Amino acid sequence: MAQERKIKIIVAKPGLDGHDRGAKLLARIFAEAGMEVVYTGLRQTPEMIVETALQEDADVVGMSSLSGVHNYFFPRVVELLKEKGLDDVLVVGGGIIPREDVDGLKNAGVKAIFGPGTDTNDIVTFIKDNVRN
Amino acid sequence: MSEEKSLEKVKAGKEKWDQGSVQKTLSKAPERRKTFTSISNIPVERLYTPWDVANLDYGNDLGFPGEYPFTRGVQPTMYRGRFWTMRQYAGFGSARESNERYRYLLQQGQTGLSVAFDLPTQAGYDSDHPLSMGEVGKVGVAIDSIEDMRVLFDSIPLDKVTTSMTINAPATVLLAMYLAIAEEQGVPFDKVGGTVQNDILKEITVRGQYIYPPKPSMRLTVDLIDYCFKNVPKWNSISISGYHIREAGSTAGQEMAFTLADGIAYVQACVERGMAVDSFAPRLSFFFNSFTNVLEEVAKFRAGRRYWARVMKERFGAKDPRSMMMRYHVQTGGVTLTAQQPLNNVVRVALQAYAAALGGCQSLHTNSYDEALCLPTQDAVTVALRTQQIVAEESGAADTIDPLAGSYFVEAMTDKIEAEIDDYIKKIDAMGGTLTAIEQGFVQREIQNSAYRFQREIESTERVYVGINKYTMEEPPPTNLLKVDMSVGEVEEAKLKKMRAGRDAGKWKAALDHLREVSQSDQNVMPAVIEAVKAKATVGEICDVWRSIYGEYRPKEFV
């Protein structure tokens, strides 16, 4: 019986922001939900995040930002993934992200934004439902 | 009747009550839950009596305010003399914008300044560094050189206000700039008062704004402490911080335990440098969080004060009572704020501020209700400041000292938290100290486990969070959010370019060369840093000197 491939997710902290409680918590919750998790640690540039996604053959990239740099970093990661031919990698984000920025991020190719207070079960479900087959 | 007999009577009475009245009521109406716990998961009993504090020895365990072991407070008159310092952490965009916010806050009755720097400044990068992209002026003010610092404190007399600066890895540089500006204003160093955070250990464990490996980082930390006690006697040269430990998910007991463990490491490092404990210890200060569970917070502060006094006296042999005082700033809990129904946060902050006052803090920042949504707007900042003013002027909490002392519950909780602190400190000592415990990931894992447990409790609705897992409602999108102008980065870059072109290159180079030389020797770096900032060396340039000597820290990640 062929074993089903685990979903592989990169949990990344873009920029200089040090708030990693959410990122680390989700890394643990994704692992418990049966995913294979790579946590990048802090101070990641978009290039570093995409390089990790490429090296790891990731299905999902999840970014967390609480310092207000999401409008620069998230779309840049989507763009670089496309350049590398990784169009089918699911990109999601979270952190302190004003609601008025959400549409712009979605238009740029970030599939979902999860704000403070989100139930982590909803995040897991969203990823499972939307990841590439 | 002897005390012992009276206690026995209480015990017997409670048993009778338990089996009689309580059982009778329970058989008709069960309690809301099987077990009750505080937000930090400490079991909470139905009722506390003198029996729960039977071992409390008033003289040894509580004493009097301003006297060892300082459980009841660090000053003899506390807020009857003067209120805590009301100090709102602020800063965003350019130095000019932040200067305007500071002057507004001072006009509104704020009594001290607290500077938030942007992340590039905190990580030791100039505004034009590639890693600063998108971050300039975002979560704090962008400071590259002494010219920015001059604008930041324009028309603010540095002998009249005290300033707290949240700066760690580059703390020496920002303090040097502050001192240089004080000098320009004609204020002698011994009239300058304030605080730098200068706490690198918690950057490594939970906050993430480190630059160099732990050992050279500790050298810079101790250089600053040493320099201040000799030259800037009113300056708090370190603010040993539990705030961020709690934000990262720790319990109240862990917050206090890991902070005091860091404190022990700093005291040890200073003693190893050859400093006499009573020379520097009176200028150590602390920084804690305050959550909504008022009674647990009060117990935490009291337990911490008592434990630290004992550590300083017994472990380090301090003789000066001021060396034994845990003086601290409090900020209300950022992570407790919700993006949902944000006005509810006003109430959370009020309770947290009340806890801070009942707990005996020396200064306080109250968060703005909109902080889970954006950087605080001026309206929200005003409400936050008014909240402390209401606690101070109207609640009565400031009129008598340590008013919750003697509450069976609060005293029992104080003992319990002190025992938890002691347990952790012993574990950390057995590992070989905080640095080792951090290297091995012990501290990080303990904190992450608590964060995980809390998240699961919320999601299973075992613990109620108003607006998150109960009493939720549909809301329109929030309006009036503060937006930092995206062009700040470009403006700062242009300004920096102009400054670099206009400075005396010979003087600048000589100052940096001298700094390099001093940094490779055993001499204190502070005088050379002050010369370098006066020669218009930037935060990034000075930090680069040290990067090239000490290397950069890349932590192991413990997930």
Image: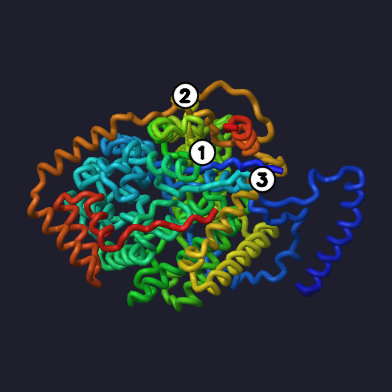
Residue at horizontal 61 percent and vertical 54 percent from the top = B449
Of the residues tagged 1 and 3, which is closer to the observer? 1
Residue B90: percent from the left, percent from the top?
A: 38, 41
Q: Estimate the spatial distance between the alpha carbons at disc 1 and disc 2, rounded to whole Å.
A: 20 Å
Cα–Cα gap, marks 1 and 3? 20 Å
Residue at the spot x=75%, y=58% of the render? B48
Left or right, residue B164 beside residue B516: right
Q: Quadrant of the N terminus of chain B?
A: bottom right
The residue depicted at 53 percent of the width and 50 percent of the height is B248
Given the image, what chain letter belongs to the residue carrying mark 3? B
The residue labelled by disc 2 is A100
Residue A14's place in the image compared with B441, above or below, is: above
Which of the two residues, B532 or B161, is positioned nearer the viewer here? B532
Q: Is residue B506 left or right of residue B125?
A: left
In the rendering, which numbered label is found on residue B456? 3
Q: Chain ID for label 2?
A: A
Residue type highlighted by circle 3: Arg
Badge 1 sits on which subunit? A
Residue B68 to residue B455: above or below: below
